[in-house]
Image: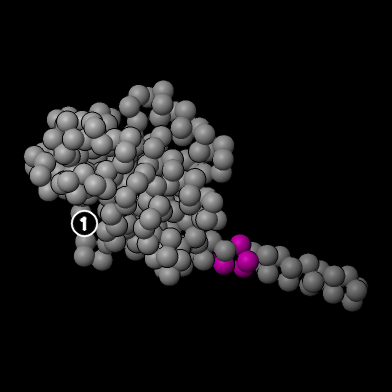
Amino acid sequence: DGLKNTADYVMICHTIIESAGRRGRKAMKKYALVMIDMQRGFIDPSSPLCIPAAAATVPACAEVIRLCHEKNVPVFYTTRHYRADGSDVEKCRRDVWLAGGKPLSEECDKCMSDAYPEEFEVRESDYRIVKPRFSGFFGTPLDLILRRLGVDTVILAGTTTPNCIRTSCYDALSLDYDVIVLSDCTSSVTEEVQRANLGDMERIGAQIETVEGLRALLG
């Protein structure tokens, strides 16, 4: 009986330790939201860089920003801002940018500026990072700040899914972050392109969620 009781005691202890470990791992999860390129220059139809489906995602993007503020999840805005002389515009985009009124620069019309949608609640505590190319990590301090904050899981939202979202996703995975991509907060030129790219990112290891799914994860 004594041996049986001892074995039962050991089993109970193991169960308690495993349960505590699972709770600890969940509690240690540290998220950050990275909102990518949700600016007038990518949303307004007058811009040559406009992603037509992006405007429809503004309410969901605004909602996830509010959710992250509520849950004390750091919010990063990685955005574009070009010099008026075009010296920092991608070579592959420069001709379209120049002919289309220099969107996202100091000389463009207000409707295609680098401003965020009015629906976004941008706080002083949020992080604003200008990215020179597609990925939010390329040539920026994003990785450094995330590590300083102890973040291990990056939540991606914004536009456009096959370019800036996807490159940011792959860079984040390469840097050993866990990645969540919000399907209702991202957009592509067609629904087919959207589905294909979300599928590719899921197969490589990203978690595809909606805002409501994220709400459940954050608790």
The location of residue 215, given as percent across then percent down, is: 39, 50
87 or 23: which is nearer to us? 87
The stretch drawn in magenta includes residue 22: yes
Q: Residue at x 35, y 46 (%)?
A: 133
What amino acid is at disc 1?
Val
How many marks do you count on the picture? 1
Q: Main secondary structure of the magenta part?
A: helix
* Colouring method of the image: one colour
Residue 71 found in image quarter: bottom left
Which residues are drawn in magenta?
Answer: 20-24
Mark 1 neighbour class, 10 Å CA radius: few under 14, some 14 to 19, many 20 or more: some
Residue 114 appears in the picture as rendered: no
The location of residue 140, given as percent across then percent down, is: 36, 58
| Tag 1 secondary structure | loop
Residue 100 found in image quarter: top left
The stretch drawn in magenta includes residue 70: no
The location of residue 117, given as percent across then percent down, is: 18, 45
Q: Residue at x 25, y 36 (%)?
A: 94
165 or 84: which is nearer to us? 84
Name the quadrant of the C terminus.
Answer: bottom left
Q: Residue at x 17, y 31 (%)?
A: 99
Residue 84 appears in the picture as rendered: yes
The location of residue 197, given as percent across then percent down, is: 46, 32
Residue 69 found in image quarter: bottom left
Q: Locate residue 49 relative to residue 185 in the image: left or right.
A: left
212 or 6: which is nearer to us? 212
Residue designated by label 1 = 122
Name the quadrant of the N terminus.
Answer: bottom right
Q: Residue at x 88, y 70 (%)?
A: 4
